Image: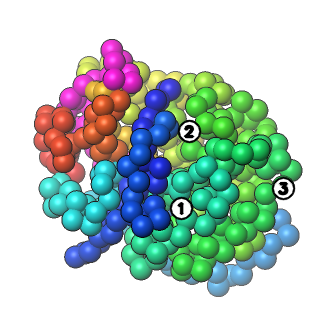
Amino acid sequence: MRRTRIRPTLVLLTALTVGMCAAAAGGSSLSTTAAPDRTATAGLPSSPRLSGAQVSTQSIADRDASAARLLVAGRNRSGLSWPSGAYVPGGSPHTYARFGAWRGHKLDVAVMWTARSNWSEITNPDWIYRTWSDMPVVKVIGVPPIPENGSATMSQCAAGAYDEQWKTFARTVKAAGMEYETIVRLGWEFNGDWYRWSAHSPSLFVRCWRQVVSAAESVAPGLRWDWSVNRGAGQSVSDARKAWPGSRYVDVVGVDSYDVWPGATSASAWNQQLNGAYGLNFWLRFAKAHGKKLSVPEWGVYPGTSHAGHNGGDNPYYIAKMTRFFRANAKYIAYEAYFNESASYYAGSLWGPVQNPRAARAYRAGL
């Protein structure tokens, strides 16, 4: 679905650990300038995906052991049977600690985005690594395959022109000690038409994806990769499977699924979200068929202005259905993260502020 999304220049969806949490900063402080926008678990495949790169047996074992420590069904920090996260604007440790206390479950996963106007912002987001290197949680980082500004193109990416940039990205993650704790959401929501990396040419997207993964993993083979689509038929490519890079290059299959198009205010509308074309169950089946787990990196009620007339408003029914979906499929869920944004285009905040009191009650009750 098309989103006119507002994100801070540097955005952080953070996680809490026992007795500690962290906030991200863009430079010295988190930018609040509005801009248009929009796991690894034990059991995920760990075979090498590189051609020409050697991945040692020990590195694979280390990766699996790290994943097992961080996210294992039934032993998550949240106490839930699936790994759970959230986005809370502001980024201060105090704010996130209060969110965790409010919902009654600590967060398992930190989901964040690099800034993306140039290569330096993508390959060396030092603020992320300074903030998160000592945090024993899985870090999920949204990373574009090419910067939003400048002359970089997907065709040049596919040709390997930016391999050195991705090796630099991998060196930065590795130097921070986060190689075995990081999932990269490369080119998220590529089946939409609102990003420079949208898959108008699915084959080009595939070649670029493979090139990025191969270059990065030649330096940091422990990285995990989340191939994240937007629920429903896409705008750049209606069937996102045409842009599937292949199981060797993907660790997690992700789907962003908000309460829009349609808003799930009835059993039939929820069934469309769940079982409709390219719905939640479609992507769950796809993930299973390829030996992967499913992530839902972005979800939530969406009563704001962007989809007026096509959302469910303050919708406890949707919240209850989503949390039941996670619980029913816990062993197949890599992670999920509620998008707790209060900006008017979205207005899906459950806490701080409470814009959706009925949905907020359902969220707490459903966890």
Q: Amino acid at mark 2?
A: Glu
Q: Are marks 2 and 1 in contact (CB under 8 Å)?
A: no
Q: Are marks 3 and 1 in contact (CB under 8 Å)?
A: no
Residue 220 seen in this snapshot: no
How would you rate the neighbour count of disc 2 (Cα within 10 Å): few for under 14, some for 14-19, many for 20 or more?
many
Q: Secondary structure at mark 3?
A: loop
Q: Amino acid at mark 1?
A: Ile
Q: Amino acid at mark 3?
A: Gly
Q: Secondary structure at mark 2?
A: loop
State the separation of the CA atoms marked 3 and 2.
Answer: 22 Å
Residue where numbered disc 3 is placed? 160
Q: State left or right for residue 131 relative to residue 246.
A: left
Residue 273: x percent and y percent?
40, 27
How would you rate the neighbour count of disc 1 (Cα within 10 Å): few for under 14, some for 14-19, many for 20 or more?
many
Residue 174: x percent and y percent?
61, 77
Residue where numbered disc 2 is placed? 189
Residue name at image x 18 percent, y 35 percent: 356
Residue where numbered disc 1 is placed? 183
- Which of the two discs, 3 and 1, labels the residue nearer the N terminus? 3
Q: Is residue 242 above or below residue 313?
A: below
Q: Magenta residues, as a range?
A: 305-334
Tell me where residue 280 sits by quadrant: top left
Q: State left or right for residue 14 relative to residue 255.
A: left
- Which of the two discs, 2 and 1, labels the residue nearer the N terminus? 1
State the separation of the CA atoms marked 2 and 1.
Answer: 16 Å
Viewer-proximal residue among 182 and 346: 346
Residue 364: x percent and y percent?
16, 48
Q: Is residue 176 above or below residue 204?
A: below
